[in-house]
Each structure stands twice: as C-alpha cells, then as structure tokens.
C-alpha cells in the first residue's frame, strides 16, 4: 500500500506514485511527500537480562527472579534516512503492522516474578522486549520534485516479556 506522510491515504482511493526523476528539470513544484511500502517480518525477542538457577536437590524450589538491570530498545531503520522519512516509516508501522509499537521501550529495573524450579532441573529466566521487524522501501520528494529513494529493514519495540526455559540435569 502506498501512503502519504501522515500514514493515512490522502483520499479514499489509492494515491498515484510520486513523479519520476524526469520531472526534476521541468520547473514543476510538488507537494513534499513520503511514500512508504512495508513488509512484515518475523518478530524478535531481544534479551535485556538473564539469570539462571540449578536445582540439584530431590525437592522443588521456589525462585524469585528480580531483574537487576534495565535496558532500552529503540526504533530504528538500517539505511540512513532523514528524520521526516523515519517518522513516516514509524507511522506506517504503527498504522499497518502493530499499533503498540513505541519509539523506545525500557525493561523495568526491579521487575520480579516467582516460579517453582522442579527437582534436578536447570532453569533460565530472561527479561526481554518483543520487537516488530519489517522491511521497507520509500520514495520521498520535496517541493522542487527532487526524489530520494531507499529501502532496508527496521525494528520497533512493543512489549516486555519474561521467558523461562528449563532442562533436566
């Protein structure tokens, strides 16, 4: 879908793509716009903090896990792009892929959870942020119809999560 800078179609119908490079020399004036096309990629679990426990006893143990550090994850794109283009890409991700994305997300220091660790088990606890991943292409043009194009991949954080894994020992 081709969208204008606001992240919403300018009208109820599909917009025409921006002018071609040949319009640059015609003296035309253009309305500055950014068009973004996205493709959703598999989301990713970005680990901020890990702790482990090993229970070598014959009894289950109760384990209170407390995150001891905080880490901030931020929205980003792989190719260099102007602030306007980045804002258009972020807006398009928010509108079409995941309304919960944020410009930045910090795992909370001191977040805690309690779990049982079965006998003869090694357990790992991870505190992480889920990240929306996507590929994008964009076309932007300014009032002189100067066209810039780019593409790449990007990411935007959207929620905290605990992940526990266990294995028998």
Image (tube, rainbow, N blue to C red):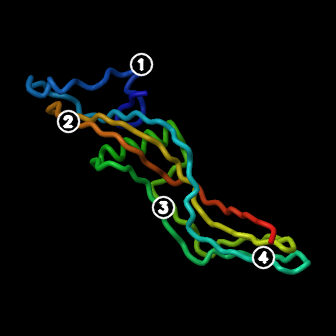
Quadrant of the image occupied by residue 54 = bottom right
Vertical arrangement, residue 126 with respect to residue 26, above or below: below
Dot placed on the residue nearer the N-terminal end, 1 or 3: 1
Q: Residue at x 36, y 22 (%)?
A: 15
Dot placed on the residue nearer the N-terminal end, 2 or 1: 1
The residue most toward the right is 58
Q: Please give the count of numbered marks on the rendered protein.
A: 4
- Mark 2 and mark 1: Cα distance apart in space: 23 Å
| Residue 142, label in figure | 2
SS at mark 1 in the image = loop
The residue most toward the bottom is 57
Q: In this figure, which residue is indicated by the disc labeled 1?
A: 13
Q: In this figure, which residue is indicated by the disc labeled 4?
A: 63
Where's the N terminus, which quadrant?
A: top left
Q: In this figure, which residue is indicated by the disc labeled 3?
A: 73
SS at mark 4 in the image = strand
SS at mark 2 in the image = loop
């Amino acid at each position: 879908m081709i969208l204008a800078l606001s992240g919403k179609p300018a009208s109820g119908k599909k917009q025409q793509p921006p002018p071609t490079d040949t319009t640059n020399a015609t003296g035309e004036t253009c309305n500055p716009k950014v068009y973004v096309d996205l493709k959703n990629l598999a989301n990713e679990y970005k680990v901020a903090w890990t702790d482990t426990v090993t229970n070598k006893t014959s009894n289950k143990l109760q384990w209170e896990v407390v995150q001891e550090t905080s880490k901030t994850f931020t929205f980003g794109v792989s190719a260099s792009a102007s602030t306007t283009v980045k804002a258009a890409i972020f807006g398009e991700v928010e509108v079409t892929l995941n309304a919960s994305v944020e410009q930045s997300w910090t795992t909370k220091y001191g977040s805690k959870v309690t779990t049982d660790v079965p006998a003869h088990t090694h357990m790992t606890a991870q505190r992480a942020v889920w990240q929306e991943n996507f590929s994008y292409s964009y076309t932007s043009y300014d009032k002189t119809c100067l066209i810039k194009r780019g593409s790449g991949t990007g990411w935007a954080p959207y929620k905290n999560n605990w992940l526990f894994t266990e294995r028998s020992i």
